[in-house]
Structure formats: C-alpha cells, structure tokens
Image: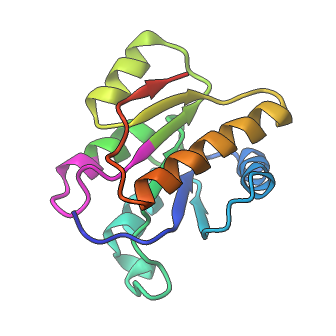
Amino acid sequence: MRPTSSTILIVQHNSLDVLRLIYAFARAAHTAPIEFTRDGVDAVAQLAGTGSYQDRALFPTPGLIVIDLDLDRGSGFEILKWIQSSPDLAGLPSVVLTSSRRPQDVARAFALGAHQYRITPTSLSGLCRLARDIDEYWHAVRAGAPVPAARRS
C-alpha cells in the first residue's frame, strides 16, 4: 500500500451532514486534517491523485476514508471496489457511515473491504460519540496497530 497521510477523507453527499461530522470530530479533539467531497468521481480522483488532485503536497493520500453509500456521481460501493482493486490503496482503512441498515448493504460493504460499518446517529451527541470512536480507531491505526477486525454498529 502507498504511504498515506494523517488526512481523513469524508465522502458524503449531504453538506449539512459533512458540517455536523466535522463539528463532531472537533468535539472529539481530532486534530488531523479532514478533507471532504460530495461524490464518487471526485473521491476516486482524490484517492488516485489525478486531475486537480495531482499535487500530493496539497492533496496527500488520505490515510482513512469515511464514506456514505449514497453519493452523487457514484456510490460508496463503487469507491470501496475501486480502492480494493488499486494496488497502491488496497486495504486502506475505511469506515462506512450511512443510514442504511439493510443486511445486504452491510454484507456488500464488508465484502468490498470496509473495516467498519456504522449507522449515522440522529442526535448530535450520538454523532460526537461516533466521531470519538472513529478518532480512537484512527489513532490506533496510525500508531501501527493492525487494522481491527470489521465492526458493525
């Protein structure tokens, strides 16, 4: 896998949800850079370092991706599939954050390499707890701990 940065890439089509999630990470005292995009095409370009994302000094390879399944121009499933097919990024730590509780979505996300499948909390306090959990997971991964087994909640 290509060396990655401490940047977290959030892929979420709803701008309000992105703002809520960034706020929740701030409340969790997360200090690493957070980038976000609304659609699958842009997410793949950022991960690949193509198009307007070619300058890796400005757009380093994210070390963690938090991804919704429902996106503009593509889906979270397509991005997970692309990540696993990329020799440089296969195994990139990924957290699916979605409202879907459908068992087939959960199974498909894990089959495509997701490390965690989390349901987006409806309350801000729940979202803050979730951001704290993701931040702890991210610190463990950055510290060299093996990527923990798949988790669903």
- Residue lying at 34% horizontally and 43% vertically, measured from the top left: 80
In the displayed image of the protein, which residue is found farthest to the right?
124
The picture quadrant where one finds residue 33 is: bottom right
Q: Is residue 125 magenta?
A: no
Q: What is the image's colouring?
A: rainbow
Residue 35 screen position, x and y as percent = 59, 66
The outermost residue toward the left is: 87
Q: Is residue 85 visible?
A: yes
Point out residue 116 in the picture as x, y percentages from the top left corner: 45, 33
Q: Is residue 75 visible?
A: no
- The image quarter containing residue 29 is bottom right
Vertical comparison of 117 with 143: above or below:
above
Give 97 or 72, whichever is nearer the viewer.
97
Quadrant assignment for the C terminus: top right
Residue 104 appears left or right of 2: right
- Residue 5 against residue 12 in the figure, above or below: below
Q: Is residue 83 magenta?
A: yes
Residue 148 horizontal/vertical position (percent): 37, 38
Q: Point out the stretch of residues depicted in magenta.
A: 82-94
x and y, in percent, of residue 61 in the image: 39, 71
Q: Main secondary structure of the magenta part?
A: loop
In depth, the one of 14 and 59 nearer the eye is: 59
Q: Residue at 35% of width from left, 58% of height from top?
A: 144
144 w.r.t. 6: above or below: above
Say left or right for 47 vs 16.
left
Residue drawn 33% across the image and 28% down it: 110
Answer left or right for 36 relative to 4. Answer: right
Position of the N terminus, as image quadrant, is bottom left
Counting labels gives: 0
Q: Residue furthest top?
A: 103
Q: What residue lies at 43% left-to-right and 60% top-to-bottom?
A: 143
